[in-house]
Image (tube, rainbow, N blue to C red):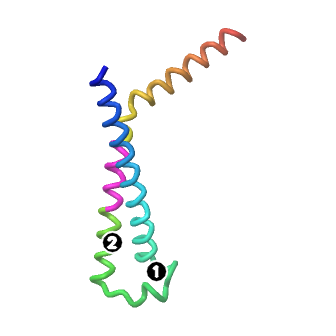
Amino acid sequence: MFKKSHCQKFKNRLLFISSIILLCYTIISIISGVIISKRILPDMTANLSVQARNIWVLVHIVSANIMISVAIVHLIINVKRITKWFKVEKSIRKSTSTNS
């Protein structure tokens, strides 16, 4: 009993931390995307040097990779929950088809 609740607490903490990380890196990715794009803020981005633009591109790439990694962690942790959703949906379809 103790191990299961301890594992569940750890899992919930991991999901919470990864959600916060995902939120932070999403914001960073949006900001870096705006800075990289010359269309959104042309006056601000026109003054960037090539080196500064390359740094922002690197920030954008790194944040995108971190977001993908965190999304994969979410999927791995929630595999059991996701499969339950599909099983419930499948059983609902079977019950509605037999009732028809």
Residue 99 position (above or below residue 38): above
Q: Quadrant of residue 92?
A: top right
The residue most toward the right is 100
Q: Quadrant of residue 79?
A: top left
Residue 55 position (above or below residue 25): below
Give the main secondary structure of the magenta stretch: helix
Kind of residue at badge 1:
Lys
Kind of residue at badge 2:
Val
Q: Which mark is residue 57?
A: 2
Q: Quadrant of residue 89?
A: top right
In percent of width and height, residue 68 lies at 35, 51
Residue 46 relative to residue 53: left or right? right
At 29% across and 77% down in the image, what residue appears? 54
Magenta extent: 63-73
At 39% across and 90% down in the image, what residue appears? 47
The residue most toward the front is 2
Frontmost residue, 12 versus 33 = 12
Mark 2 nearby-residue class (10 Å; few <14, some 14–19, many ≥20) = some
At 36% across and 55% down in the image, what residue appears? 21
At 35% across and 48% down in the image, what residue appears? 18
Q: Report, in whole angstroms, how far the alpha carbon at label 1 lies from the one at label 2.
A: 13 Å
The residue most toward the top is 98
User: Which residue is the site of mark 1?
Assistant: 38
